[in-house]
Image (cartoon, helix red, strand yellow):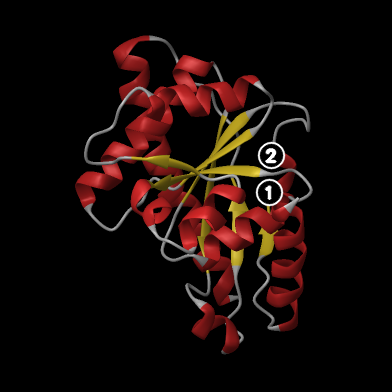
Amino acid sequence: MLYDIGAKLVNVFLTINGSKAKVYGKENLPESDEGYIIACTHNGYVDILNLGVSIYPRHIHFMAKKQLFEMKLLGPLVANLNAFPVDRDNPGPSVIKIPRQLIKEGKIVGIFPSGTRSSENIELKQGAITIAQLSKAKIVPAAYIGPRNVKEVFKRKKGYLIYGEPFTVESGKEGREASTQFLEDELNRLTEVLHNMQKK
């Protein structure tokens, strides 16, 4: 309920300010009743908003660092917006268990495998690939460029979002390693595609 209200308000807010992302490659998204993973580039919180709006009315269940849930006001809000906590310093079984269950229920899991620290970046990519492998789910690479925060939205900075073709992860360690590199390459390629579109 709160997610639906929030999505509609965010849609209006971004549209009015000219920062609702222009979306490319939406035809690459799997069928509407299928659970899958979206792995998107990340450089702020407006990309989260644009990603959610882009596939609404379907909901995205975002993986978020546990510190957000510990904040008095933000914590309950984040929980009600379909996010689930992850302890990146001491990851436990829930890191895999929760998203696998969500995918099994036909839901979409959103992961941003490009954190600010390079080590975190690698770990999140590997985590997305492992979840996809264990759940036998498709993973959709996505890239976003545009406003990063409310200040940039008010400056009417334009946003761009692109979805790449979904892929599955082969079994075994070699499958994980190959797919992790492939995801890295795809995120870079899609980002470059957006930058080229932005210049036109």
Would residue 197 be seen by someone viewing this image from the given angle? Answer: yes
Q: Which residue is mark 1?
A: 25
Q: Is residue 152 above or below residue 189?
A: below
| Circles 2 and 1 in contact, beta carbons < 8 Å | yes
Q: How far from the left and from the top, in percent, is residue 46?
A: 54, 67
**Furthest-front residue in this view:** 72
Q: Secondary structure at mark 2?
A: helix
Q: Which residue is mark 2?
A: 28
Q: Secondary structure at mark 1?
A: loop
59 left or right of 45? right
Which of 147/82 is in front? Answer: 82
Q: Is residue 40 above or below residue 180?
A: below
Which of 145/134 is in front? Answer: 134
Q: Residue at x 36, y 51 (%)?
A: 114
Residue 50 placement: quadrant: bottom right
Q: Residue at x 69, y 68 (%)?
A: 10
Q: Residue at x 65, y 54 (%)?
A: 52
Label 1 Cα neighbours within 10 Å, binned few <14 / some 14-19 / many ≥20: few
Q: Is residue 123 above or below residue 42?
A: above
Would residue 169 be seen by someone viewing this image from the given angle? Answer: no
Q: How far from the left and from the top, in percent, is residue 111?
A: 47, 43
How much space separates mark 2 and mark 1, taking CA atoms? 6 Å
Q: How far from the left and from the top, in percent, is residue 85?
A: 42, 42
Label 2 Cα neighbours within 10 Å, binned few <14 / some 14-19 / many ≥20: some
Which of 95/178 is in front? Answer: 95
Identity, as a three-letter code, of the amino acid under mark 1: Gly
Q: How far from the left and from the top, in percent, is residue 73?
A: 48, 64
